Amino acid sequence: MTASQRRTQIIEMIAERGYLNAGELSEIFSVDSSTIRRDLSLLEKTGKIMRTHGGLLPGEPAEALDTPFNVRLTMNAQAKTAIAHYAASLVKDGQSLILDNGSSVYALALALREKKNLTVVTNDIYTAIALGNHPGITVHVAGGMMLDKVYTLVGQETVEKINSLHVDWAFMGAEGVHPESGLTNINTVEIPVKQAMIKAAEKTVVLADSSKIGYRTLAHVCPLSDISLIVTEESPTLKQRSKYGSRLVVVKPENG
């Protein structure tokens, strides 16, 4: 195998798995660690991978980058508030939950602040700050590398933390929710984290405004069979609602 072939395989493996570490690559390709370090240095310089203290993450093409969080907060704000209020009504005092990243889930975090004796795990810095000063809520932050602009923690450390947990609810954001493709996301480095969140929860609820329903994006997260509920808002543009069956809950925005 040439060095070029090895580097191509490294890119493919990281894209598929979401993360790797240099030690694994050295064993897989039966080369010494200095050879792998040279490979990774070149791949990092060309933007094909991102190197972190805990391992390696896929590089992201410019067209797949997330919209900055402060921009997303202002998009469909009334719909997200209605979605969040419904989601908050599902949570009982004393329960445990995982909160994914995303502006709809952040709106839920704000709606949860009157609850009592909640345990919340999140990989979202904004959500942790929003809940951190409320005595009725204990916040655990899953560590990892922070993605620029979206303030989300990802990587092996994040996944390992979530894999050690079992919670009542996981509330997930989504870039796309499609009847055949299921839950999808733009940013591939978040996929292992999202999958771990779903696995850790008794019930998983997707919070997605109607612009996400009926659409699919770059990377598959899970099939709809892994989702308990999908909460969205009433909209004339809401697509294919009958295909989601009883999983789809449609709420009415305050100005609707």
Image (tube, grey):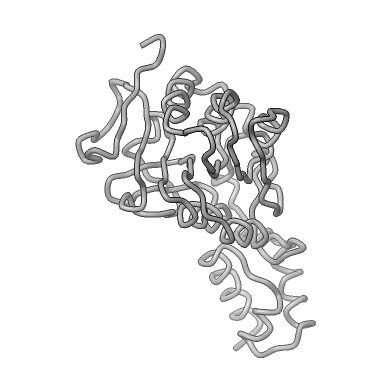
The location of residue 67, given as percent across then percent down, is 58, 35
The location of residue 216, given as percent across then percent down, is 37, 45
Which residue ends up furthest to the right in the rendered image? Answer: 34
Position of residue 23 in the picture relative to residue 101 (left or right): right
Q: Nearer the viewer, residue 230 or 181?
A: 230
Q: Residue at x 54, y 37 (%)?
A: 94
Position of residue 10 in the picture relative to residue 134 (left or right): left
Q: Nearer the viewer, residue 31 or 161?
A: 161
Where is the C terminus found, in terms of image quarters? top left
Answer above or below: position of 210 versus 180. Answer: above
Which residue ends up furthest to the left in the rendered image? Answer: 242
Q: Residue at x 60, y 35 (%)?
A: 117
Where is the N terminus found, in terms of image quarters? bottom right
Query: Where, by quadrant of the figure, is residue 13 drawn?
Result: bottom right
The location of residue 113, given as percent across then percent down, is 60, 25
Answer above or below: position of 133 versus 77. Answer: below
Which residue ends up furthest to the top in the rendered image? Answer: 255
Q: Residue at x 41, y 26 (%)?
A: 86
Query: Where, by quadrant of the figure, is residue 65 drawn?
Result: top right
The location of residue 47, given as percent across then percent down, is 68, 58
Answer above or below: position of 21 versus 249. Answer: below
Number of residue marks: 0
Answer above or below: position of 235 versus 141. Answer: above
Q: Residue at x 59, y 69 (%)?
A: 11
